[in-house]
Image (cartoon, rainbow, N blue to C red):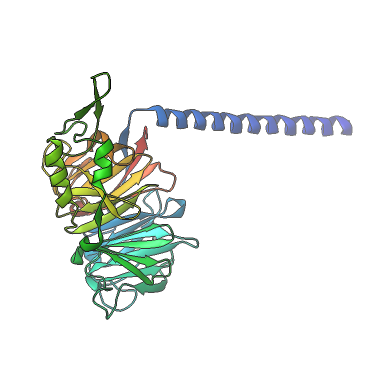
């Protein structure tokens, strides 16, 4: 009798274990199928969460995804940083208006970077970058200097690549580069930027895809036109070269993004995204200034990921996304959102951030006093 009871218990244990294994396998299979669906679906964004209601955000200008999909919101109007999880649950906050360490004057941007993770806050009004632990403890600051050629003036963005820190020094129309420890490395100003458009144009001739652009052709040996796309306005080659030679000058750079080969700079004054190689030679520009189609008008935050360049088209209160080939040739463009105060509207959105896994994008909808979280499909 005792042996039978033990046998029954053992059978039940095996049965429960089998059910658990089947459930886990089914979950993994469904997750894989959904993952494949997300990748194969047409490129689109779906609003999944709105953060801000009940937390009295006032002009949030920056947003940054950290590890575990935590979200750091630069609440500019309240001179603080507010931390949420991906579900919009409040975790903590730090900062008040002021000039000492841990205080802010018109903070505009934040980025989570490093191991251990550090939160870099662009304290624009104090012309410095402050660095914090994820719990808000102050670590260090940099950018303040008695040397006028090394000081930050109203910076707007901080980005990271190749072990260096890049700062969009908007008030001085240049970009300053620092070591990973915050020590000044070099300044990239208009006088130091060289044009590399000659080599680019030898392979890529004037034109872009959709939204006010055309293409020019180069005859092959068979006499047929071999169309090449280049993301500029539709003009003759000579006028294009003349135009490109003067258009690279920075005029209020506000944001920086990187691909493996290129550096992208969002220029608020030019209403373009300037493209440079890793030596900071000017390659060309993405976008045409205007307020229709896929034109840009005072772009601010940008993010590059998997061949897509996401642009907070601030002056038009829309999000514009460019699908790129070879890093800088526009092959397709999309607009998301419309101006307004509703669920899927923007009111001068300032900055954007993408989660580490590339599944979500967060947008600081500044004048609507909120942050919008979107799920990305098809990229």
Asked if residue 314 can be seen in this view, the reply is no
Quadrant into which the N terminus falls: top right
Q: How many marks?
A: 0
Front residue of 343 and 263: 263
The correct choice, above or below, for 87 with respect to 171 in the image is: above
Q: Position of residue 315 (x, y in %)?
A: 14, 49
Query: Residue, x 44% and y 61% (percent of image)?
Result: 163
The correct choice, above or below, for 184 with respect to 337 in the image is: below
Asked if residue 320 can be seen in this view, the reply is yes
Q: Specify the quadrant of the image occupied by residue 177.
A: bottom left
Query: Residue, x 28% and y 53% (percent of image)?
Result: 281
138 sits to left or right of 147: right
Front residue of 132 and 280: 280
Q: Position of residue 93 (x, y in %)?
A: 36, 65
Q: Position of residue 44 (x, y in %)?
A: 31, 33
Front residue of 153 and 141: 153
Query: Residue, x 27% and y 77% (percent of image)?
Result: 99
1 sits to left or right of 331: right
The correct choice, above or below, for 66 with respect to 41 in the image is: below
Query: Residue, x 23% and y 76% (percent of image)?
Result: 148
60 sits to left or right of 120: left
Q: Specify the quadrant of the image occupied by residue 212.
A: top left
Quadrant into which the C terminus falls: top left
Q: Position of residue 141 (x, y in %)?
A: 36, 73
Q: Residue furthest bottom?
A: 146
């Amino acid at each position: 009798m005792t042996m039978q009871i033990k046998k029954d218990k053992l059978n039940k244990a095996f049965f429960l274990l089998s059910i658990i294994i089947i459930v886990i396998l089914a979950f993994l299979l469904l997750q894989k199928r959904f993952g494949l669906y997300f990748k194969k679906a047409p490129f689109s964004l779906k609003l999944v969460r709105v953060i801000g209601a009940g937390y009295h955000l006032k002009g949030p200008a920056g947003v940054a995804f950290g590890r575990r999909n935590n979200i750091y919101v630069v609440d500019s109007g309240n001179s603080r940083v507010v931390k949420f999880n991906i579900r919009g649950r409040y975790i903590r906050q730090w900062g008040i208006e002021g000039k000492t360490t841990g205080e802010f004057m018109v903070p505009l941007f934040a980025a989570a970077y490093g191991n251990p993770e550090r939160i870099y806050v662009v304290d624009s009004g104090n012309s410095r970058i402050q660095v914090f632990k994820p719990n808000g403890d102050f670590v260090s600051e940099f950018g303040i200097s008695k040397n006028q050629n090394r000081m930050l003036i109203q910076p707007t963005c901080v980005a990271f690549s190749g072990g260096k820190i890049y700062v969009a020094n908007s008030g001085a129309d240049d970009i300053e580069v620092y070591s990973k420890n915050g020590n000044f490395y070099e300044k990239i100003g208009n006088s130091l930027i060289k044009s590399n458009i000659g080599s680019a144009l030898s392979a890529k001739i004037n034109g872009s895809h959709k939204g006010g652009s055309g293409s020019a052709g180069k005859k092959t040996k068979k006499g047929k036109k071999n169309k090449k796309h280049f993301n500029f306005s539709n003009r003759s080659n000579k006028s294009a070269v003349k135009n490109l030679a003067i258009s690279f000058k920075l005029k209020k750079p506000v944001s920086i993004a990187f691909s493996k080969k290129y550096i992208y700079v969002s220029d608020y004054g030019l209403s373009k995204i300037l493209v440079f190689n890793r030596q900071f030679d000017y390659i060309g520009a993405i976008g045409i200034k205007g307020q229709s189609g896929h034109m840009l008008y005072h772009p601010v935050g940008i993010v590059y990921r998997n061949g897509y360049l996401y642009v907070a088209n601030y002056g038009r209160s829309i999000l514009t996304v460019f699908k790129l080939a070879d890093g800088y040739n526009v092959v397709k463009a999309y607009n998301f959102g419309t101006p307004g105060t509703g669920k899927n509207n923007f009111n001068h959105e300032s900055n954007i951030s993408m989660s580490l896994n590339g599944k979500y994008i967060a947008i600081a909808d500044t004048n609507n006093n909120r942050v919008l979280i979107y799920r990305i499909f098809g990229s």
